[in-house]
Image (cartoon, grey):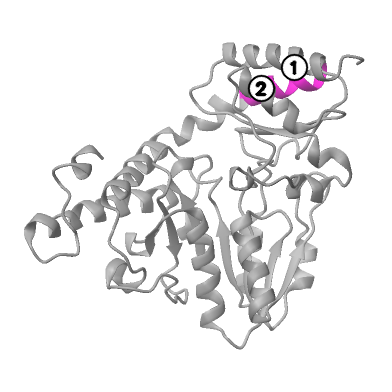
Amino acid sequence: MLPYLGEEWGNPSSSYRFGSHLKSKMERAREQVAALVGCKTPREILFTSGGTESNNTAIHAAILSSPEKRHIITSVIEHSSVLTYCRFLEKHHGYRVTYLPIDPDGLLSMTDLENALTGDTAVVSLMWANNETGVLFPVEEIAQLCRNRGVLYHCDAVQAVGKLPVKVADLPIDYLSLTGHKIGAPKGIGALYVQKKAPYVSFVQGGHQERSRRGGTENVPYLIGLGTAASHALKKLPAYDKTVSPLRDALEEGILTSIPITERNSHTTQRLANTTNITFHGIESEALLLLLDQAGICASSGSACLADTPDPSHVIAAMKPGKAARQSVRLSLGVSLRQSDITTILRSLHQIVSTLRPTV
């Protein structure tokens, strides 16, 4: 990225060579992102500012392309960028939204989805992997059901891309969202896959950038960063699961077997390799996170996008009603962690839990 933050600072939409030659660099980044998600053509990749814009853009495109349809289907555990936009459409534009429930393991019922579909459904927006539990939805089944019923399908794959093999060319997905910072690119850059036959209406209006699909001067350094990160993620993908899942399992087993009154919040197998979510019954997650932070361990009680709200995790609340949502912690592991890190985390957790729950 460094040359494009310094000497190569031209505007790629300009007619002079100082800027216009950057178009080829941008297209190379588009090809790298397309390769990571298995597009038929790089032209199906649209650069955005991140997952939130990608999610909003996809839903916006779907509903405006079929203005006569007034029904949207999503789930109760989607990312806030989907849920907040759906609630906005309900409140201000009169759309009817069905929020599908999930079971105590975080799984979605295909029967519920099938029963919710109607001739008035404009779009189904269901994620690939949950950002708090790592639980996977049956994307291929969802996509095929939507295609069979003639309904557009948007998949929020922000958590899945770079961790699971993704090949959209083989799936009847109309829109798929991804973001840069989940695969090592900077924060503030993302992309939206728009299947070549899927309808599209611009969300950000402006100039002719992105083939007139998203106005605004292109963020060249960040596009380069996203493309480079996508290339690295694709190379590392074959070894990702076998590298990370043993560490997650060791951490999870260490917590569940040696710290009393703890509970896993996810399905045992249908989930990402890097995520574990644990309820520490009797301990407020806010207190636990504060002491973990003081020990140099970064964790969360929900999505980082909602870190400033006092509300409990809507994901855990949907899975397990009661106090669990205020007593749960998400631990996400990266490929750079080692077994020695897991030992350190477990040691710190033991000490912290003993401090907060001394009678157990």
Residue on which disc 2 sits: 292
Amino acid type at circle 1 is Ile
Residue 112: percent from left, percent from top? 79, 65
Above or below, comparing residue 261 to residue 176 in the picture: above
Location of residue 287 with respect to 42 vertically, above or below = above
Q: Position of residue 148 (x, y in %)?
A: 63, 74
Residue 341 in the image, given as x and y percentages of width and height = 58, 15
Say what secondary structure mark 1 lies in: helix
Secondary structure mostly taken by the magenta-highlighted segment of the chain: helix
Mark positioned earlier in the residue sequence (2 or 1): 2
Give amino acid for label 2.
Answer: Leu
Residue at (65% x, 34% y) in the render: 300
Q: Residue furthest bottom?
A: 68
Q: Is residue 173 visible?
A: no
Range shown magenta: 246-257
For this rendering, which residue is in front, 133 or 147?
Answer: 133
- The 10 Å Cα crowd at callout 2, few under 14, some 14 to 19, many 20 or more, is some
Q: In the picture, residue 67 is in which quadrant? A: bottom right
Q: Could you say which disc has been placed on residue 136 in the image?
A: none
In front of the other: 221 or 121: 221
Which quarter of the rendering shows the N terminus?
A: top left
Q: Is residue 295 visible?
A: yes
Q: Secondary structure at mark 2?
A: helix
Name the image quarter holding residue 350: top right
Q: Taking 145 as reference, is 30 above or below it?
A: above
Mark 1 neighbour class, 10 Å CA radius: few under 14, some 14 to 19, many 20 or more: some
Asked whether the residues under the numbered discs 2 and 1 touch, taking CB atoms below 8 Å apart as contact, a structural biologist would say: yes
Q: Residue at x 46, y 49 (%)?
A: 179
- According to the image, label 1 marks what residue? 352
Q: Which quadrant would residue 275 be assigned to in this image?
A: top right
The residue depicted at 79 percent of the width and 18 percent of the height is 353
